[in-house]
Image (cartoon, coloured by chain):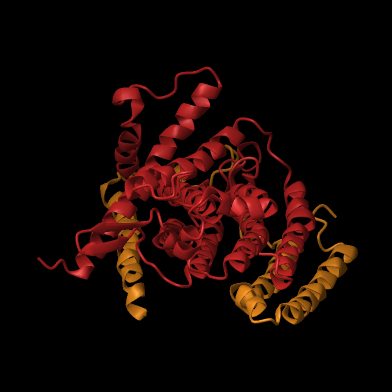
Chain colours: A orange, B red
């Protein structure tokens, strides 16, 4: 069982090695001649004004929270999706379907609420 | 002679990883070649025949370029972020079955790096990780364009990830397994391809691929007229190349996943007992079609606006994907399979 994951570990080592090697190689081989102007953040030729560590729009935060909500929902849906066929063949299909409809229904109401409240309007 | 199992693993890893990176490199050439073809230009044709060695020349140039790190950047994160973006995209390839099972003498070798029962979950988990590379790279640069680009990219990727998961779950519900090999083996005949039973999921998934990889018409993370280069504005040399490698790898993996889930993976239409190498060729053709679609769409459709993208994701795709999943569930529950 667990040995089927061993190739993934080796592959992960190869991939991470490849990525890190790329970073190191260009650090070692690239030329370095730093000047003040080169070190400035690029702003289309204007002199950068202030720091870029600015406060973020609440929209991005809201989207992230909504994402977590629905992502957790989809995780709960995974076990159902895997076993739906087997349960249906065991003769309990309709009741399982009723349960999952209720579950998705509650979240659909949640989505409708956010929608109604304008949480999905980006350009508000 | 006994061939040790790790050796077989190693050969598969080298072949598949090599194939993935070469595909990504060739995509960087195809991007320019197809663009040129669609605009009546010639495109790169100086390095090697038809410019085929151009990616190699680019790679050498990237390695010897100067690495710029803007003043005020978070140096550690700035250096690490490209690897954080590229590595998960490459890792997801581990569970994709690129072909059936090869029987060589007494060995039967399944053609994927790992044949795990949670393949779909593994893929979703790791493809979700690549967001960190994007948002950390954007934030660590200490540049306003980068920050906005990174934020946009992450908002877009997480919004469309929901649709991605829900459409995949519809297929999983039909197949009753998370194992990608089983899913592709269940579609031997062209009539069993999931595209016939899940047409809506197929369309949603295909469009979501574009949003997930920040490709045209959803490339807000790097839309040049607004944000210069987006989250990788400040990157140069090999780190810049790593971001692109990661993007092309993500495109390749999603194309492969689309072929596996909906188009039967390595199954050849009307020839179910085709030998394994024909299966691989069929798989590459299907995945290649989606890769070409990325470029085709880029030169055919105008870029959307960011609010349109968010509206499409949350108000159209998410409800559609949910409804599709429920209807699929209904069909399964009431015995119409």
User: As rendered, which of B20 and B2 lies closer to the eye?
Assistant: B2
Kindly identify the residue that appears in the image at 45 percent across and 45 percent down. Answer: B268
Whether residue B318 can be seen here:
yes
Quadrant of residue B156 in the image? Answer: bottom right
Instruction: Tell me which corner region of the image, top left, top right, bottom left or bottom right, holds residue A2.
Output: bottom left
Image x and y of residue B328, in percent? 70, 64
For the C terminus of chain B, the image quarter is: bottom right
Q: Quadrant of the N terminus of chain B?
A: bottom left
Compared to residue B69, the image places residue A117 above or below, namely below
Q: Residue furthest right?
A: A116
Asked whether residue B144 is in view, the answer is no
Closest to the observer: B162 or B95? Answer: B95
**Is B318 left or right of B218, judged from the image as shown?**
right
The x and y percentages for residue B149 are 61, 51
Spot occupied by residue A119 in the image (x, y as percentages of width and height): 82, 63
Residue at 56%, 59% (x, y): give it. B135
Q: Nearer the viewer, residue A92 or B259?
A: A92
> How many tags in the picture?
0
Foreground residue among B200 and B333 = B333
Question: Relative to B275, is B183 above or below?
Answer: below
Q: In the rendered image of this protein, does residue B317 appear above or below residue A36? A: below
Task: Answer with the quarter of the image where residue B51 lies.
Answer: top left
What percent of the width, then of the height, locates residue B89?
A: 46, 57
Residue reaching furthest left? B1
């Amino acid at each position: 069982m667990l040995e089927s994951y061993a190739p993934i570990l080796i592959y992960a080592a190869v991939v991470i090695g490849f990525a890190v090697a790329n970073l190191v190689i260009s650090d070692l081989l690239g030329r370095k001649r730093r000047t003040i102007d080169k070190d400035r953040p690029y702003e289309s030729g204007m002199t950068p004004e202030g720091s870029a560590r600015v406060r973020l729009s609440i929209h991005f935060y809201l989207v992230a929270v909504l994402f977590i909500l629905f992502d957790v929902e989809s995780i709960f849906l995974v076990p159902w999706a895997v076993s739906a066929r087997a349960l249906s063949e065991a003769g309990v299909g309709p009741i399982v379907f009723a349960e999952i409809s209720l579950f998705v229904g509650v979240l659909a109401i949640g989505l409708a609420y956010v929608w109604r409240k304008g949480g999905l309007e980006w350009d508000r | 002679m006994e061939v040790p199992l790790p050796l077989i693993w190693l050969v598969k890893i080298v072949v598949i990883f090599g194939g993935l990176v070469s595909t990504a490199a060739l995509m960087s050439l195809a991007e320019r070649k197809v663009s040129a073809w669609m605009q009546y230009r010639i495109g790169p044709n100086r390095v090697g025949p038809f410019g085929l060695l151009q990616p190699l020349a680019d790679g050498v140039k990237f390695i010897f370029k100067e690495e710029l790190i803007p003043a005020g950047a978070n140096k550690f994160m700035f250096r690490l972020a490209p690897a954080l973006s590229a590595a998960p995209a490459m890792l997801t390839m581990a569970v994709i079955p690129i072909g059936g099972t090869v029987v060589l003498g007494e060995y039967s070798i399944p053609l994927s790096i790992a044949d795990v029962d949670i393949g779909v979950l593994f893929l979703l988990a790791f493809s979700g990780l690549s967001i960190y590379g994007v948002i950390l790279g954007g934030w660590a640069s200490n540049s306003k364009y980068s920050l906005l680009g990174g934020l946009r990219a992450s908002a877009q990727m997480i919004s469309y990830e929901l649709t991605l998961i829900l459409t995949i779950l519809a297929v999983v519900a039909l197949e009753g397994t998370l194992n990608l090999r089983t899913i592709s083996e269940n579609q031997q005949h062209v009539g069993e391809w999931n595209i016939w039973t899940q047409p809506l999921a197929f369309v949603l998934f295909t469009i979501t691929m574009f949003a997930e990889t920040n490709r045209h018409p959803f490339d807000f993370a790097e839309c040049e007229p607004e944000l210069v280069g987006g989250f990788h504005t400040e990157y140069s040399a090999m780190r810049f190349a790593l971001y692109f490698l990661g993007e092309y790898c993500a495109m390749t993996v999603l194309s492969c996943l689309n072929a596996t889930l909906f188009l039967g993976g390595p199954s050849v239409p009307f020839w179910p007992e085709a030998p394994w190498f024909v299966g691989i060729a069929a798989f590459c053709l299907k995945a290649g079609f989606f890769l070409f679609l990325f470029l085709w769409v880029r030169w055919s459709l105008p870029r959307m606006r960011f609010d349109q993208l968010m509206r499409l994701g949350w108000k159209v795709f998410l409800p559609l994907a949910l409804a599709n999943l429920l209807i699929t569930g209904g069909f399964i529950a009431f015995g119409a399979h």
